[in-house]
Image (cartoon, rainbow, N blue to C red):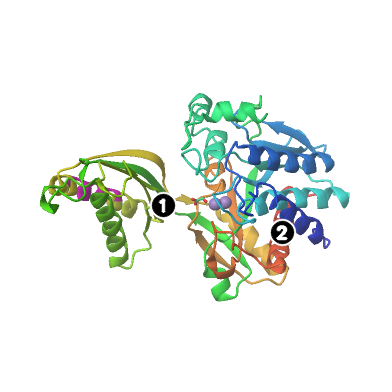
Amino acid sequence: MTELDIDAERLLGRLRTLGEIGRDDGGKLTRLAASDTDRLGRDRVGGWMREAGLEILVDRVGNLVGLWRTGAEGAAPLMLGSHIDTVINAGIYDGCFGVLSGLEVIETLKAAGARPQRPLAVAAFTNEEGVRYAPDMLGSLAYAGGLGVAEALATVGTDGTVLGEELARIGYAGTQEPGFLRPHAYLEIHVEQGPVLEHQGIPIGAVENVQGISWQRVTIEGEANHAGTTPMRMRHDAGQAAARVVTFLRERVTRGNAPTVATVGCMTFEPNAINVVPSRASFTVDLRDPDEERLREEELALARYLDELAAAEGVTIQTERLARFAPVAFDGAVVAAIEQAATRRGLRSRRMTSGAGHDAQMIARLCPTAMIFVPSAGGISHNPREHTPAEDLVAGANVLLDVTRALCGG
Ligand code: GLV
Ligand code: MN
Ligand code: MN
């Protein structure tokens, strides 16, 4: 294979440009799925796809795909991709790096006059983050057939909006059926969002699996009462009960050596007044573990604790499942191809598990799949300080280019 490199300045420039779309007056970047800012981001990325000569296709759940037919229409396409929706007050790399690297790889091959033996597609999947609509990775899940279109479009967001209505409003309710291209293989490059690669001084992660994810909403009903007059022993304090759950989770998952992680990221109280014992607390629980058995045990332990807590505090507790995905193993041959590509570039690599959820774990239901990670400075992500040095971004995108060439031939 002759040496070929991506255009580093084009890739880095686009990352910066996309990273400016969706900033509020205070400079915070937020592009929640199917919002006005998501529309602006999609328009920009779709524009770049069009300028690169790709055919733009949008499916019914809003997944945006740029397709280069390459003259090899009979063959199944190689798909690259990730997402461009963000969390609240986000960094510029999560997801965007994967979509823009996929586009960069395709443009590089086109400019070099390459003749891939299969079509090449780059996808930006809808609502990967799951901040506005649950479950996370909704677009890729629907693409892989794991969620029906009607159900996906009927999803009600944290702000009361309906996904299908919002997609129509922003002009991204497409006509293709999700899964309209059945890929030969899928590759996703992403920032690690954790500390491992940076700590070990290794530039490339060959991701061989993704841990399981369990999301629930817990609602505790107590009794509102006067904060000054109600003796402590007479209270049915939903806020106190919620706080006990936070502490229970932290203590339980830090007790042993298991890699389980638990997060309570959202919590609201009612009536939310300084001098009223909370009558209601509603909060989310994000539990993750690479081992399905252990993840199930943690879910059961939480359920048992909630039963005990309800009795002890005189409150009622309900849970609602928001997302549940078992751990996913990627394709060994694709992981090996990533390692080989890194070695040929003189880059050290290591196999690793993804702690974050990714569209790749859904597309893995359809075709051989794996991911490439590049280091995250300080292991920080879902934070505006998210950063990856330019050198690492470019090295990773070149590995994506080489694996693409290896999987496409020509
Ligand atoms: C997606 O970013 C996740 O929550 O892992
Ligand atoms: Mn991501
Ligand atoms: Mn994310």
**Residue 300 highlighted magenta (yes or no):** yes
Q: Is mark 2 within 8 Å of ligand 2?
A: no
97 lies left or right of 295 = right
Position of residue 117 measured from the top left corner of the image (x, y, whole percent): 78, 43
Q: Residue at x 26, y 45 (%)?
A: 278
Q: Earlier in the sequence, mark 1 or mark 2?
A: 1
Q: Is residue 176 visible?
A: yes
Q: Is residue 179 above or below residue 269?
A: above
Name the outermost residue toward the front: 228
Residue 69 x/y as whole percent: 79, 37
Prevailing SS of the magenta stretch: helix
Numbered disc in front, either 1 or 2: 1
Residue 1 shown left or right of residue 297 in the figure: right
Q: Which mark is residue 265?
A: 1
Under tag 1, what secondary structure? loop
Question: On the picture, is 197 further left or further right than 66?
Answer: left
Percent x, y of residue 241: 23, 50
Question: Which stretch is magenta?
Answer: 299-307
